[in-house]
Image: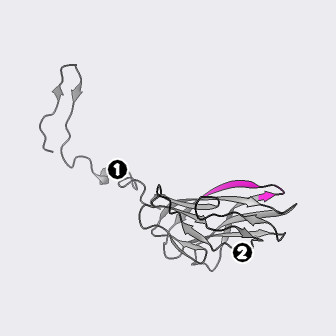
Amino acid sequence: MSRARDIANIGDGIATVDIDDGAVTAAKLFSGFANGITQTDLWRLVTTVTAPAGTLETFERADDASFNYIGNGMSYASGIWSFPTTGIYLVSLTSELRPDGVDFVNANLEVSSDSGSNYDSVAVTAANEADSTTSVHIFVDVTNSGTFRVRVNCASFNPGSQILGNTDTNRTVVSFIRLGDT
């Protein structure tokens, strides 16, 4: 659009102003805003896991008609997610837990910054003696997309305890949203 007018008076007294092409650019906006949210993804546990112990490995990307990831999406293999690009990410875990009797069952979000050699447990969902759906949220500052990893690690004491999953609906899910630059 060319600069057609600086100020135009409209019959009801409202003034409008035209802005030249290129007057507002991404360079004039704060970092990370130029394209809004550039990465989102959602993964769900596809089957219920009984007597969970160790890394949960049966996640799939949500495939509902109403969902589509933004950007490249997370890479996933054998229970471990890798990040597509650097930035500040909001990572959320919602888990539906079913303890057996007086058992304690938990699912932990764990983060590695050294390609999976070491993991830090940074958030825990847990249930004791009763079914529970709990959520935790963490911020991960991914400074190197080649070395940062996330996994869900779990434990229980009784062989009948479960972490619930389903291929058609979200019961235990992990979501990723890139909020901005690191």
Residues drawn in magenta: 127-138
Q: Residues within 10 Å of mark 2 (few under 14, many from 20)?
A: some
Residue beneath the point at 87% across and 61% down? 101
Residue 143 part of the magenta segment: no
Looking at the rendered structure, the secondary structure element under dot 1 is loop
On the rendered image, what quadrant is the N terminus found in?
A: top left
Residue 133 part of the magenta segment: yes
Q: Is residue 113 above or below residue 99?
A: below
- Mark carried by residue 29: 1
- Mark carried by residue 54: 2
Distance in Å between CA atoms under marks 1 and 2: 44 Å
The secondary structure that most of the magenta stretch takes on is: strand
Horizontal and vertical percent position of residue 121: 69, 67
- Of residue 88 and residue 174, the one placed in the foreground of this image is 174
At label 1, which amino acid type do we have? Leu
At label 2, which amino acid type do we have? Gly
